[in-house]
Amino acid sequence: MPRTISAIADLIQSRRDELCGRFVERARRELRESRMPDPQLLDSFPALLDALVDALRNGPAPRAPAEPPRVAAVATVHGEQRAGMPVDVVQLVWEYGVVGDLILELAEEQGLRPAIADLRVLEAAITAAIAEGVRRFVQAREVTSRRADARLRAVADHAPAALVLRGRDGRFLFVNRFAAEVLGVPQGELLGRRFEDVVPPAVARRLAGADARAGRGTTVELRETLDTPRGLRTFHTVTFALAGASGPEDPAIVSIGLDVTDAQTALERLRHADELLELGDAFLELDRAWRIVRVNRNQERLSRRSRETTLGRVIWEIWPELARPDSPYWIEYHRVMNERVPSEFEAYFEPLDMWNSVAAYPVTDGGVAVFFRDATRRMRDEQRLRQARDFEQQLIGIVSHDLRNPLNAILLGTSSLLAREDLSDRNVASIARIRSAAERATRLIRDLLDLTRARLGGGIPIQPRPTELRQVAQQVVDELEPSYPDRPILVEASGNTQGHWDPDRIAQVIGNLVTNALKYGARGTPVTVGVAAEDGEVLLSVHNLGVPIPAEIIPTLFEPGGRAAPDPTGRSVGLGLFIVERIADAHGGRVEVRSGEEDGTTFTVRLPRTPREGSPGWRAP
């Protein structure tokens, strides 16, 4: 019959929390695992108390394999949990033993006299818990050990070095994959063999000597060259006795071989690089602490300091002028050092009144390599050139803008005068000449402003909008015809001549090309303006007959001042074709010229129907 009354069971159940607290206090006093948090330290302790209560009230339970006793089940979980912690089996047994001590101590404090039957049940339950807990603990540790050993072998097989473990008799106990590849023998066939079986005799004797010295407690380093499947390779080997080896069956000697062939080659290249460094730019190398560790002769010459006075010293101490936080040397060197990115910059070095072109690079040991080149002459030449260009642009800008206002006043005045009816023919002719000169000066100012914009790098601005090129060409021709009554100007158009262009700028192109054709073409011959659609573009052409343009002049024809022949009027500064090309470029187009004795001269402007966004001078409509 199961027992239903147990004073010990009632005590455990009623004072369960107190027993848990006493367990934690005892563990913190007596065990290393006292550093664990309370929940981890208690682990399965509360469940074990509940299982003991159940055992005391129900008596011993049959140990059915499919359904172990509750105490054993709790101990199974507890053993597995402790196996994953830094706890040894002695401590595990202590935990179960202290459970009985705590229960009996509490019973004694309460004046209880446990029944013999209760004590027997309690002892049997705790013994069963110890047995099951230890069993599960050991099993879990063995599984972990096997897994760790497998992982260790996997790591060794992936290591980029040859690893060989040998017994004290010299026979291989373990050879990793890299070593097997070096020796040219499968891993499984190497086990149980010795070095003399797989390497030349001279090498085997040296390795055997290293084993003997390693067995006496010495770490031995050798460098050997072997004929491997990958060719001749040089290995740096380290041989030592394995700590803790205690018998002939244990792996007693370890050899680790690192392939240093590429490193040797790199060292040779480095020595060669040092020689090359002496031939190139000035050079110095800084370590992580900003100490100068290497300089070349050109650096000595450029800095006017010998290497003996700089090597080993901090760069900021030698040249304190560089240590200002706003110094580009300070800023860029720190950026290279901290961010590990290269930097190129140009900076003035005040102590030597010198401009330096500097290239700084991070090096593998954490420092910085710096190359210098004297850029003083180039920087000063560029500065003088910039000053000359700035003056040129300012002069053109000032003249162009300051002349525009009085010319506008002259044009307005002449227009007002010509509207009067009381002027004589002589006065009308004089005023007309004044207006013509003012208009010519206005066009010259416009060309100068366009030249200024183009040379400043912004391109000639355009504002594309829907435009009919045929109409623009006809309008320009209508405006020019009165000034050239003796020269026919024809407009020939075909296909779809619509697109998105800046009509004012296109009119400027047509006007410049037609004016050039009228000035340089043969007298009495027509000038033809062609507008035609072709392959997604619209072609604008201006043709005239006359003396062809010399072939050697064509490459410079579109430069400022470029012209095919001297201006017969003497009034042009030679900006017309330059501006034509820049306007075409701003539209994403191009200008072509063809000139010959029989066919005459033709300028062709190829315009895409829509300028590419981002073309020089492009502005959103």
Image (cartoon, rainbow, N blue to C red):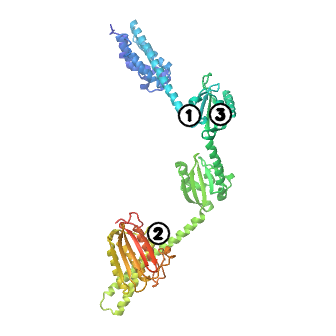
Task: Determine which quarter of the picture holds residue 69.
Answer: top left
**Label at residue 177:** 1
- Residue 327 visible to an observer of this rendering: no
The residue tagged 3 is 199
Task: Determine which quarter of the picture holds residue 187.
Answer: top right
Number of other residues with Cα within 10 Å of mark 2, as a class: few under 14, some 14 to 19, many 20 or more: few
Q: Position of residue 547 (x, y in %)?
A: 46, 82
Q: Quadrant of the N terminus?
A: top left
Q: Position of residue 263 (x, y in %)?
A: 62, 43
Tag in front: 1 or 2: 1
Residue type beneath disc 3: Val
Q: Residue furthest left?
A: 421
Residue type beneath disc 2: Leu
Earlier residue among tags 2 and 3? 3
Indicate the secondary structure of the residue bearing disc 2. Answer: loop
User: Where 143 falls versus 580 (above or below)?
Assistant: above
User: Where 486 falls versus 6 (above or below)?
Assistant: below
Earlier residue among tags 1 and 3? 1
- Residue 357 visible to an observer of this rendering: yes
Earlier residue among tags 1 and 2? 1
Residue type beneath disc 1: Arg
Indicate the secondary structure of the residue bearing disc 3. Answer: loop
Q: Quadrant of the C terminus?
A: bottom left
Residue depicted at 50% across the width and 76% down the height = 551
Q: Nearer the viewer, residue 483 or 359?
A: 483
Task: Determine which quarter of the picture holds residue 240.
Answer: top right
**Label at residue 61:** none
Q: Nearer the viewer, residue 169 or 600?
A: 600
Q: Real-space Cα distance between discs 2 and 3?
A: 75 Å
The residue tagged 2 is 456
Q: Position of residue 325 (x, y in %)?
A: 54, 54
Indicate the secondary structure of the residue bearing disc 1. Answer: helix
